[in-house]
Amino acid sequence: MIRLLLADDHKLVRDGLKQILAAVADVEVAAEAASGDQVLSLVKTGAFDLVLLDMSMPGLSGINLIKRLKLERPKLRILVLSMHGEHQYAARALKAGASGYLTKDSASEQLVGAIRKIAAGGVYITEAAAASLVGDAGGTDAPAHTQLSDREFEIFRLLAEGHGPTEIAAQLRLSVKTVSTHKTHILEKMNLGSTAELVRYALEHRLLDQTPGA
């Protein structure tokens, strides 16, 4: 039996996933979490084989949460189930310690297969995620955003989505000064002159989530 911790801040999503997994004989949803802090607390005190993890939750989240979970429980298996496309976060999530990456529009059969493969010690990546890993390997032709640290990339995306430093600081639990410093470093690393240029870059490289049907 695969003991699974289900982590997503949207109850409707958790309920939908529980309904899918209820029909799977060898998977048990042993606990649920609606924030990164709750995930970390449960992992510290409970015994889970795998965490099914949303990338964007209140509090500690994303790449930093994956790293913290792996520090706490090095053998814990993590499958990211995210609204963000593979080309945005897959490479960073896998490098941080996740064992698989799926988007939320994946088929339920694909999800169950990924859970079983990862729980058995394997790694699950789609073709798009594999391409992301290859493209993120660096080199002279690597896109500018691949040179950003995980924290810088997180702030880069929030800036590109239109969030201001004060809002980003509250969301990431950082000081406004720290966010502003990161912003300066991001613009310097990417050789960009303004937030408007940053937004244009994000759009050109498909780093923002697209509204379905848009």
Image: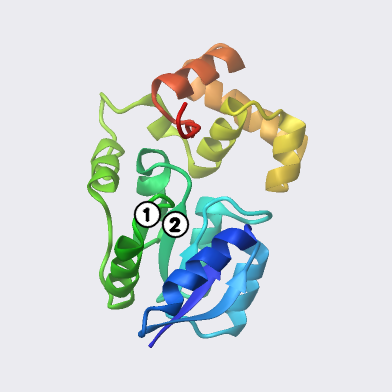
Q: Quadrant of the N terminus?
A: bottom left
10 Å neighbourhood of mark 1: few (<14), some, or many (≥20)?
many
Q: Is residue 9 left or right of residue 66?
A: right
Quadrant of residue 50 within the rendered picture:
bottom left
* Residue type at numbered disc 1: Leu
Q: Is residue 117 above or below residue 25?
A: above
Towards the viewer: 113 or 73: 113
Mark 1 element type: strand
Residue plotted at (47% across, 16% down): 191
Contact between labelled residues 1 and 2, with CB atoms less than 8 Å apart:
yes
Q: Is residue 124 left or right of residue 168?
A: left
Q: Which residue is mark 1?
A: 102
Q: Position of residue 208 (x, y in %)?
A: 49, 31
* Residue type at numbered disc 2: Leu
Q: Position of residue 158 (x, y in %)?
A: 60, 34
Residue plotted at (28% across, 78% down): 120
Q: Position of residue 167 (x, y in %)?
A: 74, 36
Mark 2 element type: strand
Towards the viewer: 85 or 182: 85
Mark seen at residue 81: 2
